[in-house]
Image: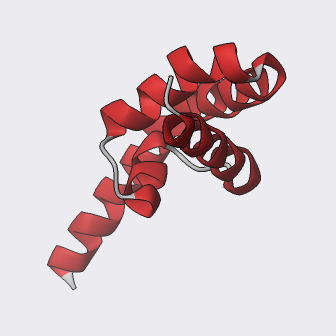
Amino acid sequence: MKDYIEERALEIAKHIINEKATVRQTANVFGVSKSTVHKDVTERLPKINPLIANKVKLVLERNKAERHIRGGRATKMKYKAIND
């Protein structure tokens, strides 16, 4: 694996852990695709640093469990803006 990919994977992991960020938010910050972020944290990161990979996994699992709430909130705001 190339050095810059390892560095990117670690930076992405730090961002996700510190900001409790979603894959989509992280992809926007780093200017890469959601697929790249996902591959970095699920396939590459465990080979680089398993401890950090586990922390990222916990954050992503929490985000996945809460996504239906965020989606409902976004829809509510959308229709509120339309009706105002």
21 and 66: which is toward the camera: 21
| Quarter of the C terminus within the rendering | bottom left
Picture residue at 59% right of the left edge, 50% below the top: 21
Q: Quadrant of residue 65?
A: top right
- Residue 52's place in the image compared with 25, above or below, is above
Work out which residue is located at the far front of the displayed protein and give it. 2
Residue 35 x %, y %: 32, 31
Left or right: 65 in relation to 55: left
Picture residue at 73% right of the left edge, 45% below the top: 17
54 and 10: which is toward the camera: 10
Residue 57 x %, y %: 67, 23
26 and 10: which is toward the camera: 10
What count of labels does the image hold? 0
Left or right: 44 in relation to 59: left
- Residue 80's place in the image compared with 47, above or below, is below
Q: Quadrant of residue 80?
A: bottom left
Picture residue at 30% right of the left edge, 43% below the top: 33
Work out which residue is located at the far left of the displayed protein and give it. 82
